[in-house]
Image (cartoon, helix red, strand yellow):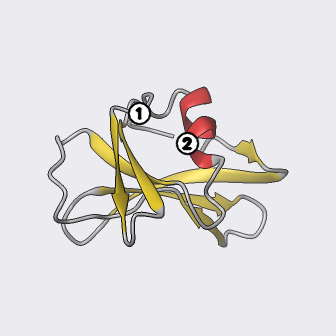
Amino acid sequence: MKTYKFKGTKIYIEKLSYPNGRTALEFTNAKTGESHLTATVNIPEQELLPEAICIKTWCGNEEVLAFLIAQGIISKTKYKFPVGAGLAIVHVVDLLMKDF
């Protein structure tokens, strides 16, 4: 499993699935094996193409989008939309890498 350095922490990225089958990306601390953060968010009511995922950019995830793009794991933002009270923005991207 490939490791990455994210905000000073050595991590690996796990490709998981939400209950509805959509892809989830989990950053796991490579040293402890504990979850570092979840890069994605599941918005079941949002229609997505099969290769599309929703990237969460709030609550400590502000740098995740740029990091994943720089690593070639995801595409640049295809489109974005507000969630909740409109204060948080979800970025819809394509998953480019299948294996991490």
Could you say which is closer to the camera, residue 1 or residue 14? 14
- Residue 15 vs residue 4: left or right? left
Where residue 19 sits, quadrant-wise, is bottom left
Could you say where residue 65 lies in the image, as x and y percent from the top left? 55, 42
Q: How many marks?
A: 2
As drawn, the label of residue 77 is 1
* Residue at x 39%, y 71% (from the top left corner): 85
The amino acid pointed to by label 2 is Leu
Q: Which secondary structure lies at badge 1?
A: loop
Could you say where residue 70 lies in the image, as x and y percent from the top left? 61, 28
Q: Which secondary structure lies at badge 2?
A: helix
* Residue at x 32%, y 64% (from the top left corner): 42
The amino acid pointed to by label 1 is Thr
- Which of marks 1 and 2 precedes in the sequence? 2
The quarter of the image holding the N terminus is top right
Could you say where residue 82 lies in the image, as x and y percent from the top left? 36, 57
